[in-house]
Amino acid sequence: MNPTTVQRWALPVATIVLVAVTFASLAVGDLTLSMQEIGDGLLRRDETAAFVLWGIRLPRTVVAIEIGLALAGSGLVMQAYFRNGLASPGLLGVSSGGAAGAAVAIGFGWATASMFVVPALAVAGALTATLAVIGLARRGASTERLLLAGVALNALLGAVTSYMLSNFTISYERNAQIIFWLLGGLEDRTWTHAAMAAPVVVGALLLWPLGRPMDLLSLGAREAQTLGLDVRRLRRQLLGLATVMTALATAVAGTVGFVGLVVPHLLRLLVGPEHRRLVPLSLVAGAAFVLGCDLVVRAADGLRLGIVTALVGGPFFLWLLRRAR
Amino acid sequence: MSRLELTNIGAPNRLTGVSLALEPGELVGLIGPNGSGKSTLLEIAAGLLPEATGAVSWNGERLEHIPIIERARLAAWVPQEAQFEFGFSVRAVVAQARYAWGDDGAGVDAALARLDLTELAERPVHRLSGGERQRVLLARALVADPPLQLWDEPLAALDVRHGLEVLHLAQELKQRGRTVVLSLHDLRAAHCLDRLILLDRGRLVAFDTPERVLTPERVREVFGVRLSTGGGLNLELA
């Protein structure tokens, strides 16, 4: 296919796919709903359908879209920031920070106090991780320094999570909770979760006009500055957006890997490197990807969202690596 | 009013106390052994070294008072080497120079043609050879066509013909009143420039016409080589 044809149709096709999986997400489950029933349910003309949709499936769908936006958006941002197509929210230790925060909250039993404790500590953990990386890399923020700081933080925060798991073996229940959360999932998500992650939508909108500046940044900070870009300001904006978006996604759905890595990477192969195209496309495709994976989760017993995204993303990523050589 | 004025500029362990002023329509060479501070001088002149000391002025205005977007309209900096990621096309990279003008795309085709890149325009930059990439960077500097051009070893990776083309381009810019500073190692090419800045171990040794800078004694002292003035120094495009 002609590359310009792909470029022109990528966003419309991704949007259609997103709409389709959204409908599927509303229709599929223990009780399969027809288009008619979905309409009636949304308008509360059918009580059973209304209960299933407004009480269970709509919030779950909204949360899925939100974390798709967040993870794919922040993945794209981090790839531009580090000028490296293999970068992802997990790279900086942001996801690990969120996981460690949640593990601490559950492990010490604080989670029972309020449903906001786990997300709050997850956000705190993720933000701490990012601030630590920025602090470590402040003097001469070379890519290598940032990446190595991320590696070290991932190890450190992973150790915190492991300690919580090994230290609280007495409480089987808490351990199960931590593991459940670490696997990432959208089970039992409510409107409260959807509201908690809502700032992600604002983040996605703020990302929209940064596509062109991201092009310049991805060709090197110094070149970008001589071409008229306020690099320091853009970097702050990008890192802030990526961190908050990842933290909120991790807070409401646990650790869901590979979305931020694979979605922007695949789209770049499809439509080329220009971020004006990649930003909207990554957001829409990220949302569709997470929703699609969640449909698989619902269709099979014992699966979790984090497992499915890794099962899809892992091999795909290995294929990418092989292909890139 | 000088186009570029450097007052006692320096950077720790790299460059010390260099002061000089360049006028509009001047084509200036920057020479010196490896590690003598050529790239550092250009980076400071372009406002790219935050740790630099001293003062830099463009057209009589202190650099720190010029907004970043305005700087892009006043000067272009060509790095010695650039890392390209994500497979941007040659055209996309060159067109980036119009960012400060709202991405109007003006002059991109002409700049591509001038640097012999029209055929390569849609190719991803990271697939090009070193010399081709260097021409891409020069084309990007040409698109912006600012009054001040700062080129860090633009000839390093170029073949003979393209090297001469670039020197011609620099002459052409000078005739249009642009100020061009370029670092180079080819002393014969340096001889065709208006003035030369000679650096050695981070210090300014001389700033004068090529004849006065490149004396056999000084060349021996700074570069440790013997210069025979008997041979011709002419360089011509074939």
Image: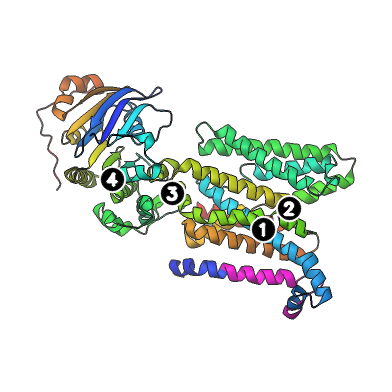
Cβ atoms under marks 2 and 4 closer than 8 Å: no
Circle nearer the viewer, 2 or 4:
4
Q: Which mark is residue A66?
A: 1
What amino acid type is highlighted by mark number 4? Pro
Q: Residue at x 36, y 44 (%)?
A: B70
Q: CA distance from mark 4 to mark 1?
A: 45 Å
Q: CA distance from mark 1 to mark 2?
A: 10 Å
Cβ atoms under marks 3 and 1 closer than 8 Å: no
Query: Is residue A310 found left or right of B202 in the rendered image?
Result: right
Cβ atoms under marks 3 and 2 closer than 8 Å: no
Q: Residue at x 24, y 26 (%)?
A: B198
Residue marked by disc 2 = A252
Highlighted range, magenta: A14-37
To which chain does the residue with label 4 belong? B
Name the element at disc 4.
loop
What amino acid type is highlighted by mark number 3? Leu
Q: Is residue B24 magenta?
A: no
Q: Quadrant of residue B68?
A: top left
Q: Earlier in the sequence, mark 1 or mark 2?
A: 1
Note whether A222 is above or below B142 in the view shown.
above
Q: Which mark is residue A216?
A: 3
Q: Residue at x 15, y 46 (%)?
A: B237
Q: Residue at x 61, y 60 (%)?
A: A286
Residue marked by disc 4 = B146
Front residue of this view, candidates B3 and B80: B3
Name the element at disc 1.
helix
